[in-house]
């Protein structure tokens, strides 16, 4: 079986990742799961496409023609009717514009694959849209990422502390800010008056409290 031309068209993201580390990571993840594409994975997609009732209706319409009226289209495939001119079949695999259409039974696997590197929602959407398609894919990705325990854990760990307001001074040196700075091999104490914005920079011999 020779599917090189079709699959190289279907997954252009693999060829354009050299200058973007994040894209390289997702491409590696996809390759590791044989999406472009081992014989075993090809046969799996073919088999599940043949067993998918909705996709078989789509295949039939592609081969025999779509109804002229949108109202006559089965409700389960009306979303495909809107893009019917972009659909095609190649050796048992169903594509929309060069993107592989994923049968219902494999969508869960693809969601886990796409989110394996634990990218955020928008990054997962962007990368998934470049290589595959199914109706409702965006909302499925949102649910997958939002329910990820690992992402939720690190999201909380990396959250920023809320900004805290401070009182406005009414006279000089009522409120000052103090910080330490190193420049070269010398340490400095920096003092700023919040009211006048006056700054004092004092060279320190060392950073001990006595100093």
Image (tube, grey):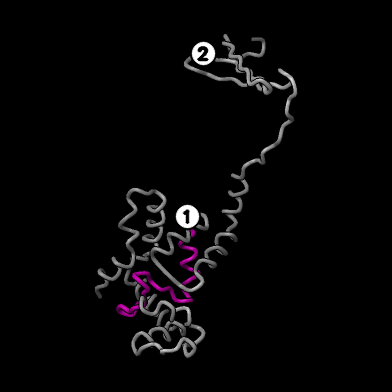
Camera-side residue of 20 and 200: 200
Label 1 crowd (10 A; few <14 / some 14-19 / many >=20)? some
Q: Is the C terminus in the top left, top right, bottom left or bottom right quadrant?
A: top right
Coordinates of residue 169 in the picture (x, y in percent): 73, 25
Q: Residue 169 lies in magenta, yes or no?
A: no
Q: Residue 182 carries which label?
A: none
Q: Is the N terminus in the top left, top right, bottom left or bottom right quadrant?
A: bottom left
The picture quadrant where one finds residue 190 is top right
Camera-side residue of 202 and 56: 202
Looking at the image, residue 143 sits to the left or right of residue 58; the answer is right
- Residue at position x 30%, y 78% in the image: 90
Looking at the image, residue 55 sits to the left or right of residue 144; the answer is left
- Residue at position x 67%, y 23% in the image: 194
Which of disc 1 and disc 2 is earlier in sequence? 1
Q: Which mark is residue 186?
A: 2
The picture quadrant where one finds residue 89 is bottom left
Magenta region: which residues?
87-116
- Residue at position x 36%, y 60% in the image: 31
Q: Are marks 2 and 1 in contact (CB under 8 Å)?
A: no
Closer mark to the observer between disc 2 and disc 1: 2
Coordinates of residue 152 in the picture (x, y in percent): 60, 53
Q: How far apart are marks 2 and 1 (CA)?
A: 44 Å
Residue where numbered disc 1 is placed: 117
Q: Is mark 2 on a helix, strand or loop?
A: strand
């Amino acid at each position: 079986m020779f599917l090189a031309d079709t699959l190289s068209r279907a997954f252009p993201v693999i060829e354009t990742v050299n200058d973007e580390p994040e894209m390289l990571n997702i491409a590696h993840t996809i390759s590791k799961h044989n999406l472009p594409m081992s014989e075993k994975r090809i046969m799996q997609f073919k088999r599940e496409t043949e067993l998918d009732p909705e996709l078989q209706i789509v295949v039939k319409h592609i081969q025999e023609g779509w109804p002229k009226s949108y109202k006559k289209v089965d409700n389960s495939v009306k979303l495909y009717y809107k893009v019917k001119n972009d659909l095609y079949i190649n050796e048992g695999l169903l594509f929309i514009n060069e993107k592989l259409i994923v049968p219902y039974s494999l969508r869960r696997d693809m969601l886990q694959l796409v989110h394996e590197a634990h990218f955020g929602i928008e990054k997962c959407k962007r990368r998934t849209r470049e290589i595959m398609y199914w109706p409702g894919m965006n909302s499925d990705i949102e649910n997958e990422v939002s329910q990820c325990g690992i992402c939720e854990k690190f999201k909380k760990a990396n959250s920023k502390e809320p900004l805290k307001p401070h009182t406005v001074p009414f006279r000089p040196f009522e409120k000052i800010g103090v910080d330490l700075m190193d420049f070269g091999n010398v340490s400095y104490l920096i003092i700023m008056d919040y009211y006048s914005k006056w700054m004092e920079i004092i060279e320190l011999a060392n950073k001990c409290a006595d100093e």
